[in-house]
Amino acid sequence: MAVYGWIGLGNMGGPMTSNIVNAGHTVRGFDLSQRAQQLAREGGVEVVGSIKDAVSEADVVFTSLPKGDHVRSVFDGSDGIWAHAPKTALLADASTVDIATSRYCHEESAKRGFTFIDAPVSGGISGAAAGTLTFMLGGEPEAVSRGQEFVAPMAGNVIVVGGATSGIAAKIVNNMMLFINLVGVAEGSQLAESLGLDAQTFWNIANTSSAESWAQRTWYPLPGIVDSAAANNNFDATFTAELALKDVSLALEAGAETGVNLDAAQLAAQQFQKLIDEGLGKKDCSLIAKLSSPDGTVRGYDPSAD
């Protein structure tokens, strides 16, 4: 059985580590959030008080953090992963970050005698809880081969993408496509409502027709249709508008660097920015449905309940 060092026990890292523990491994986790710490303890994680305590005896170290700046900060410095992890440990980042940050982690890890892979995931909180995430692995072949064993307790699918940063590149493109699709699902849900269609009947049609998609199956923005939808819980976040904007912005940054025109991604970014400007950045990204509603409201959302 392996010892996992884990930095970031939030909405994704918490349930991911619980599945590792359930598979018989040891997880030593670190997070600044008291709530995240408590939930991780309930999932069997040995919550520790520092990065050093999390990584010093680890066979593998995972980071699962919101932004590239966070990832860089926990790797570097006198209190960071590079300072305290054994050189034999595989280092893996499961966060969704910019390609430059992933490249930095690959290059600096190699300079310091470590092996690093980018290991972003797709499948959301529900996939993290169920242990059915798709992992996209990028790095040297031997490192990726080791990584496949370590991600197995959390994964429904493990895809070897290629060399360094290829995993995160795939994740950025995948998320861009998801959020572009979500714009269509949000607009479609409101147009169907305004045309007097029964929501469940229309969803059933979409689910067996050409409009079927992960966003439609999982995040449909009306209550009582999809169990996993935030619309059932006043649009409390399963994935915040702020994080959605962050992910689309990573794709736009990559498009600018490569010369690819991403007009639809620009539209998605504008939608999430509107929610943030309204003070709704912490609400679920699927609340963009209210932007399509004729009167700016959406069934399932009560502002007074926030």
Image (spheres, helix red, strand yellow):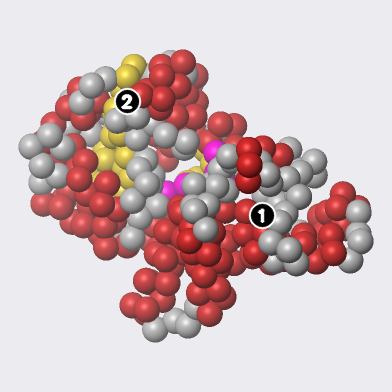
Label 1: which residue? 215
Q: In terms of secondary structure, where does tag 1 sit?
A: helix
Residue 48: in magenta span = no
Find disc 2 in the rendering and name its residue: 29
The x and y percentages for residue 205 are 88, 58
Residue type at mark 1: give it: Ala
Q: Which mark is residue 151?
A: none
Q: Earlier in the sequence, mark 2 or mark 1?
A: 2
Identify whether 83 is placed above or below 208: above
| Residue in the picture at 35% in, 24% down | 34
| Residue 214 in sight | no
Whole-number angstrom distance, CA of label 2 to CA of label 1 = 31 Å
Q: Quarter-wise, where is residue 17 in the image?
A: top left
121 in the magenta segment: yes
Q: Is residue 246 visible?
A: yes
Question: Is 256 on the left or on the right of 184, as rendered?
Answer: left
Q: Are marks 2 and 1 in contact (CB under 8 Å)?
A: no
Callout 1 crowding tier (Cα within 10 Å): few <14, some 14–19, many ≥20 = many
Q: Is residue 12 above or below residue 209?
A: above
User: Where does the N terminus fall, quadrant-wise?
Assistant: top left
* Quarter residue 65 falls in: top left
Q: Is residue 261 above or below residue 137?
A: below
Tell me: 196 left or right of 117. Answer: right
Please tell me which residue is depicted at 77% across the width and 60% down the height of the picture.
189
Of the pair 211 and 231, the residue shown nearer to us = 231
Residue numbers of the magenta segment? 120-125
| Callout 2 secondary element | strand
Of residues 199 and 47, the one nearer the viewer is 199
